[in-house]
Amino acid sequence: GQQVMQIPQYQHVQEGEDFTTYCNSSTTLSNIQWYKQRPGGHPVFLIQLVKSGEVKKQKRLTFQFGEAKKNSSLHITATQTTDVGTYFCAADLNRYSGAGSYQLTFGKGTKLSVIP
Amino acid sequence: KAGVTQTPRYLIKTRGQQVTLSCSPISGHRSVSWYQQTPGQGLQFLFEYFSETQRNKGNFPGRFSGRQFSNSRSEMNVSTLELGDSALYLCASSLVQRTNTGELFFGEGSRLTVL
């Protein structure tokens, strides 16, 4: 079935290094959302991207939506130990056709470990 | 504003039993979704409810069912439990938006262990 592919699965970085996770879809997306799940916690919404080529920043986090609306990335500059967790992208894969499916399909996530 | 509340937080069942999980959405949120999270499969969509109607269902067997009440609270039920049903069950509520799938607000989850 339709999927949202997310890479890498795991990333270990030294504190202060940068981190990037990528999300790809074979279909054009109407929008994409990003969530963060801390160890032992629940997913928490970070941001939603809607426009082609959109770039949004939240402090050290930069989110991009591809020009073709088929891929997205999350980049963290100068990681801190508070950035530890799993980052998920999510999309309604059926929305672009105009008929929303009322479900989000999540990528498998990228688990970020930060070595102090 | 209170967040999404899920009960119970932890439970242990044996194969063949059934379980009911409860979810109270954020006040004013009428859409409630359920997701199953496992290490191997990640977050998988179970179903979504709005105004007591199931609008979509994921690829899960009929043993998984749910419902929504007039106050938007939702329950999901799993009958004839199998070992593979052990997972974190997450409920999420959202404000229904006309043009886009809205931001999901997740509860803490109900961690089910099937022995």
Image: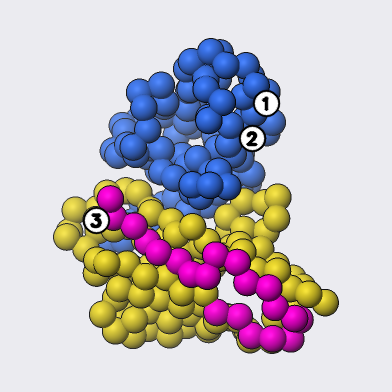
Q: Position of residue A113 (x, y in %)?
A: 70, 69
Q: Is residue B26 magenta?
A: no
Identify the element where label 2 is drawn.
strand
Foreground of the two, B66 or A83: A83
* Residue underneath mark 1: B11
Which residue has dot 2 on it? B111
The image shows residue A41 at horizontal and vertical percentages of 67, 51
- Is A13 a magenta residue? yes
| Kind of residue indicated by mark 3 | Asn
Q: Is residue A31 left or right of residue B13?
A: left
Could you give the CA–CA distance between mark 3 and mark 1, rounded to whole angstroms? 34 Å
Would residue A58 appear left or right of A84 to someone viewing this image? Answer: left
Palette colour of chain A: yellow
Mark 1 is on which residue type?
Leu
Q: Are dots 2 and 3 on a single chain? A: no
Judging by the rendered image, the residue that carries numbered circle 3 is A94
Determine which of the numbered discs, if any, sits on residue A113 in the image.
none
Give me the residue at 48% from left, 22% from top.
B78
Instruction: Give the drawing colour for chain B.
Output: blue
Residues shaded magenta: A1-20
Who's the residue at 64% across and 44% down the image? B108
Residue contact at pointers 3 and 1, CB within 8 angstroms: no
